[in-house]
Image: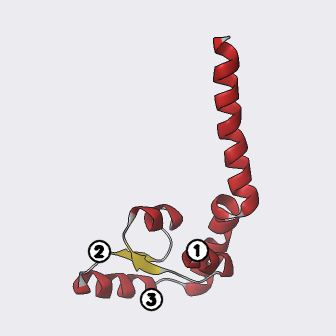
């Protein structure tokens, strides 16, 4: 949850490259991802992130959160999934 909250606040992430963080960072487009346990990878990610325009990157983080990770965004996705399931079940009858 901390990455999600950080994105909502516009914090530019430098996080490990694990599946959930990859999705939450728009496949690494926001901030930078580094390989767990790899110091050189962390250093490279930190350099990459600190070379970005932080006000612009911060705004991108907030926009991504609002579009993909906020409660309304998640609710819209859930409604879409439920509608698909109901539609498939209704069509089979």
Q: In this view, does 52 lie to the left or right of 70?
A: left
Q: Position of residue 46 (x, y in %)?
A: 38, 87
Quadrant of the drawing holding the N terminus = bottom right
How far, Cα to Cα, is label 2 from label 3? 17 Å
Q: In which quarter of the image is residue 12?
A: bottom right
In the image, what residue occupies the spot 65% across and 67% down? 65
Q: Sequence-wise, which precedes: disc 2 or disc 1?
A: 1
Residue sitting at the far top: 93
For disc 3, the marked residue is 50
Quadrant of the drawing holding the C terminus = top right
Label at residue 35:
2
Q: Sequence-wise, which precedes: disc 3 or disc 1?
A: 1
In the image, what residue occupies the spot 65% across and 21% down? 89
Number of the front mark, 2 or 1: 1
Crowding near the residue tagged with mark 2, few <14, some 14–19, many ≥20 C-alpha atoms within 10 Å: some
Q: In this view, does 38 lie to the left or right of 12?
A: left
* Depth order, front residue of 51/11: 11
For disc 1, the marked residue is 1
């Amino acid at each position: 949850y901390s990455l999600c909250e950080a994105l909502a606040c516009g914090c530019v992430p430098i996080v490990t490259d694990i599946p959930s963080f990859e999705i939450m960072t728009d496949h690494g487009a926001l901030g930078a991802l580094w390989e767990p346990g790899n110091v050189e990878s962390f250093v490279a990610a930190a350099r990459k992130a600190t070379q970005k325009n932080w006000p612009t990157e911060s705004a991108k983080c907030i926009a991504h959160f609002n579009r993909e990770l906020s409660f309304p965004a998640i609710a819209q996705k859930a409604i879409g999934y439920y509608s698909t399931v109901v539609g498939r079940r209704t069509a089979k009858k």
